[in-house]
Amino acid sequence: MTIHPVAAFDRIGEENAFAVLARATQLQHAGKDIINLGIGQPDFPTPAHIVEAGIKALRDGQHGYTPATGILPLREAIAADVLRRLSVEVSPEQIVVVPGGKVTMYMAILMFGEPGAEILYPDPGFPIYRSMIEYTGATPIPVPMREANGFGFSAEEALSLLTPRTKLIILNSPANPTGGVTPRAELEKLVKGLADRPDIAILSDEIYGQMTYDGEAHASPLSYPEVADRVILLDGASKTYAMTGWRLGWAIWPKPLMAAARKLAVNSFSCVNAPTQFAGIAALNGPQACVSDMVAAFDRRRKLVVSGLNTLPGVSAVTPKGAFYAFPNIRGTGWKAKPLASALLEDTGVATLGGPDFGVHGEGYLRLSYANSEENIARALERVAEFLTRVRPQ
Ligand code: PLP
């Protein structure tokens, strides 16, 4: 007899981005020149005024526990941000500050997942959705995100998958890994379609909500009074303010779920570390040019990466409308996605992820994060082009 975790842990998954990051770092230490288009985090440092606020909080003696849901001035700043950007009034009493956006999806899926329940989630999509759904014993129901649709969400397709057992529907726009953005018209169709299903909650992952291009507007289900009272809005500072390592996320919770969310916080992390919360106040209440400057840089790289990808033999890429990912179709190369991603890393030092890391509908695609310099993107594309002409598919 040996010790082992309960059976539910056999169903819990991984995020391969971290495994690829580890392998890329290992190759780098061995002397290989690595260009990392694998991990999804801004390559910019956290803006200086935010860093200073965190340091000041430490110097000022902010070393203790805070309220489990987060300090009030941060929750007020989050409520003001939601009002400014989405024109929706929320109370700081509906907000829970968490160590990273991921924690909100963990909480929400725990609240609705159980054997017999069905949870809809985007596929290809962020891998933790499916992993956590399976952990709870609920049935994961993938909503395909289709290239023909620009990887935009189809309300009709999602609504066709509802059953009396559906408990939660997960939305993600702008989307990881595709860069797809849900058109407002599709969101409206979904809202209408859910009118007679008040028993279904919506988890709206808007962690890339400020990263849209070509004048594309970000739309949130929280803006629709018909469903707002059952929307869990997931957001955070990781991507918007280049703060992935600080671990700062937050969510707007429907009032009936607030007690459960607070109790989960108390039962797990107690509170987000205090200096990070003060840095979050500086991020939200401070100048926002750091966000628009970063998005403008991503936009230039987006154009570079898409035009470069479309010149590669056997590769075609739709233009992503948000986030900082491209999701090129690589079927014409003759390669399967994961062997190609792995060969590219080992042979050329270019780290990418295979589409299947994001779900059953991800075969035939790679995910490239263009949160890297224009120079590195150009060098990576050159290496991939050379590789595809030199190496036959395996
Ligand atoms: N949601 C999506 C769609 C993401 O891509 C990520 C991170 O990559 C997260 C949530 C989690 O963000 P955080 O690092 O704040 O936990």
Image (cartoon, grey):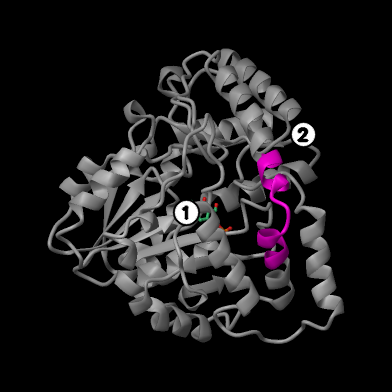
Asked whether 183 or 157 is in front, the reply is 183
Picture layout, residue 76 above or below residue 284: below
At label 2, the amino acid type is Asp
Picture layout, residue 118 above or below residue 72: above
The quarter in which the N terminus is drawn is bottom left
Q: Of discs 2 and 1, which sits in the foreground?
A: 1
Q: Label 1 belongs to which residue?
A: 86
Q: Label 2 belongs to which residue?
A: 33
Ligand 1 within 8 angstroms of badge 1 C-beta: no
Region in magenta? 280-294
Q: How far from the left and from the top, in percent, is residue 262?
A: 47, 82
Picture layout, residue 29 above or below residue 337: below
Asked whether 218 or 131 is in front, the reply is 218
Disc 2 to disc 1, C-alpha distance: 43 Å
| Residue 245 seen in the current view | no
Q: Is residue 54 left or right of residue 200?
A: right
Q: Is residue 284 left or right of residue 58?
A: left
Magenta span dominant secondary structure: helix
Q: Residue at x 60, y 41 (%)?
A: 38
Q: Residue at x 48, y 78 (%)?
A: 93
Sequence-earlier tag: 2 or 1: 2
Q: How far from the left and from the top, in percent, is residue 330?
A: 45, 24
Q: Is residue 326 left or right of residue 365?
A: right
Picture layout, residue 320 above or below residue 387: below
Q: Residue at x 36, y 67 (%)?
A: 109
Q: Residue at x 83, y 69 (%)?
A: 55
At label 1, the amino acid type is Leu
Ligand 1 within 8 angstroms of badge 2 C-beta: no
